[in-house]
Image (tube, rainbow, N blue to C red):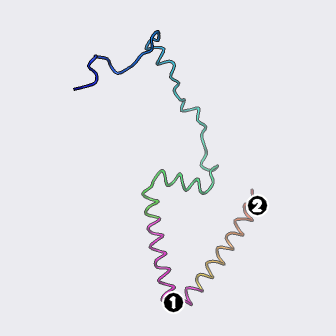
Amino acid sequence: MTDDADGSDGKRSVIGESDDAREESAPTPDPDAVGEVDFADLSLPQRVFVAAVQNPTRGVVIAALFAFAFSFYIAFWMVFPRLAAAFTGLGIVLAAVLAVVYYLFARYVD
C-alpha cells in the first residue's frame, strides 16, 4: 500500500500560490558567488586538511608509514642507544638550523 492514494505527485501547494511562484521563490546559490581561494593563501594546517580531504587514502598510508618508521626508531634506541642518541642530537641541530633559516627567509625575503 502506498501513501499516494490521492493521486498527487507529492508536491504540496499553498492556497493562492501557483507552481511557478514556488519555483521562483526558492533562491539557488550561485556557484560563482563563492570566492575562489588560492591554495597559496592557505596556512600549512589548512593545506594538510585540504590534501587529506581530497585523498584520504594517501593520508592513511602516510600515517602507517610514519608509525612503521617510528617503530624502527624505537628499536634503534633499544639496540644502539649511543648511536641513536648521536643521530637524535644531529637531527635536533639540523631541525634548529632549518627553523632559523626558515625564519630568516620569511622575515627578510618577503
Q: Alpha-carbon neighbours of circle 1 within 10 Å: few (<14), some, or many (≥20)?
A: few
Image mark for residue 107: 2
Q: Quadrant of the C terminus?
A: bottom right
Magenta span: helix, strand or loop, mainly? helix
Q: Is residue 98 left or right of residue 4?
A: right
Query: Magenta part of the protein: which range?
Result: 63-85
Q: Nearer the viewer, residue 106 or 7?
A: 7
Q: Alpha-carbon neighbours of circle 2 within 10 Å: few (<14), some, or many (≥20)?
A: few
Image mark for residue 58: none
Image mark for residue 80: 1
Q: CA distance from mark 2 to mark 1?
A: 40 Å
Q: Quadrant of the N terminus?
A: top left
Whichever of labels 2 and 1 marks the residue nearer the N terminus, that label is 1
Q: Are marks 2 and 1 in contact (CB under 8 Å)?
A: no
79 falls in the magenta region: yes
Above-or-below relation of 98 to 45: below
Above-or-below relation of 54 to 21: below
